[in-house]
Amino acid sequence: YPLCAPSRAAFMTGQYPSDIGVYDNGGSYFFTPQTPTFAHGLGAAGYEAILCGRMHFGPFDTFHGFEKRIHSDTGKFLSYEIQGEGGHRTNGQTKYAVEVSGHGKTGAQTFDQSVADTACDLITNRQDERPFALVVGFFLPHNPLICSRELFDHYMAQIPPLEPESQEYLNNLHPAMKKWRERRGVDDLTPEQNRRGLAAYYGLVTELDRTIGQIAEAVKTSPEGDNTVVMYTSDHGDMAHQHGMWWKSSFYEGASNVPLIVSCPSRFLQNQTQDANISLIDIGPTVLDLAEGDPLPDVSGKSFTGFLTGEGIPDWPNEVFCEYAGLLGDHPACMIRTGPWKLNYYSEFDSCQLFNIEKDPGEQNDRSNDPSCQEIVQTCLQKIQARWSAEDMLDNLKKQARARKIIQSCGHSLTPHPEPRYSAPEGSNEFDFSQLPKEPSWSPFKNGS
């Protein structure tokens, strides 16, 4: 789901966002504490599950199964001058977010460094003998597109002048992609603005890479370094000017194909790339498999441990389903990737795009109308129709919007003050167990209690 909160909810639960009712970034209101996550599963397996940094939880449950949070989510970390407001926000999906790009610093870098320092301190100095699982959440390389002067100048020197998308290309775009661009104004950006945004984005990636390097080094030098599995992934990608687009919220590879790197030299293959379609919903089942814990109930994800060990997974479905709705008026849409084929279905126009990612990694050749591809089109559409409904998604989004409106207008914080504790006065409870005709199966007086 190429949007923060729904993607993270799917990552944590092993379930599709539409199955748990998390459709947009406000969906955290409806991410119920009764939905089990792999953090709950790790606790059940004897692990201490710890969250450090960003995870887009809340407002009713900021833990979702984690036993401990050692660093908060971002909170307010951008100044008003840098963040902006309304349709002029550097951390949103508006052309302003690319217009205001360059060198400097923001609270995003400060937040990420604080998260990394906190995580490294735990890894280096932890005394608890229990096994633990630490999830570390960063903000970068999310916009604002503002990085250090050193890195901005470095990448500006590497990036040649950019050419705008040709009018022929724009004329032949799928109608859904034309709408996407209109809603965000990306076609108004100049080549030089895009070049500056790209240099800053590369700089933010490098800043994040250095920060993650600190954690990797802390793991490597820790007492349990040889017995620690490290995974790196992301909730979504960024178009970073591919197709002349930015940010997330699309099914193009830049936004929806995220990195997944797994390392534990004492247990897994090294320097190998597995050619398989894997989803974020598969990570939780894999984590619990590695921890020898019980699997989560009613999940759609599957463990990919066999790929890590080299044993392989003969019955791996090699298919990924992805969905999206809601931002800036975008209508519900979904994607299915099966083998080399990717079909993007847009309910607003009841039509699709089809790409062969192996032969066309840049997704330039839409083959949805190619007569030789109609069988794969129909097969993919049937799979989508069997499990997904744009109408249901719209109905649920409207219902949630009505609910959120009243919740947010109640006039006070969702947790106005610490919950008062009640203690029953002495003598409030009396019961003579001898009155029972038969001894119950359990009694508070057994075992000396």
Image (tube, helix red, strand yellow):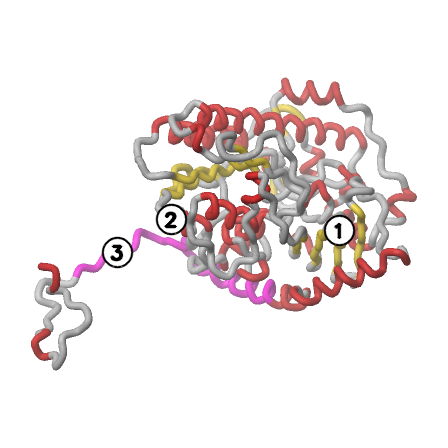
- Magenta span includes 230: no
Furthest residue to the bottom?
437
Residue that carries the numbered disc 3 in the rendered image = 420
Residue 205 screen position, x and y as percent: 62, 29
Q: Is residue 51 left or right of residue 96?
A: left
Residue that carries the numbered disc 1 in the rendered image = 342
Of labels 3 and 1, earlier in sequence is 1
**Observer able to see residue 296:** yes
Query: Image quadrant of residue 167?
Result: top right
Give the residue drawn at x 74%, y 62%. Answer: 347
Q: Residues within 10 Å of mark 2 (few under 14, many from 20)?
A: some
**Observer able to see residue 22:** no
Kind of residue sitting beneath label 1? Lys
Residue that carries the numbered disc 2 in the rendered image = 45
Tags 2 and 1 touching, CB below 8 Å: no
Give the residue drawn at x 32%, y 52%. Answer: 417
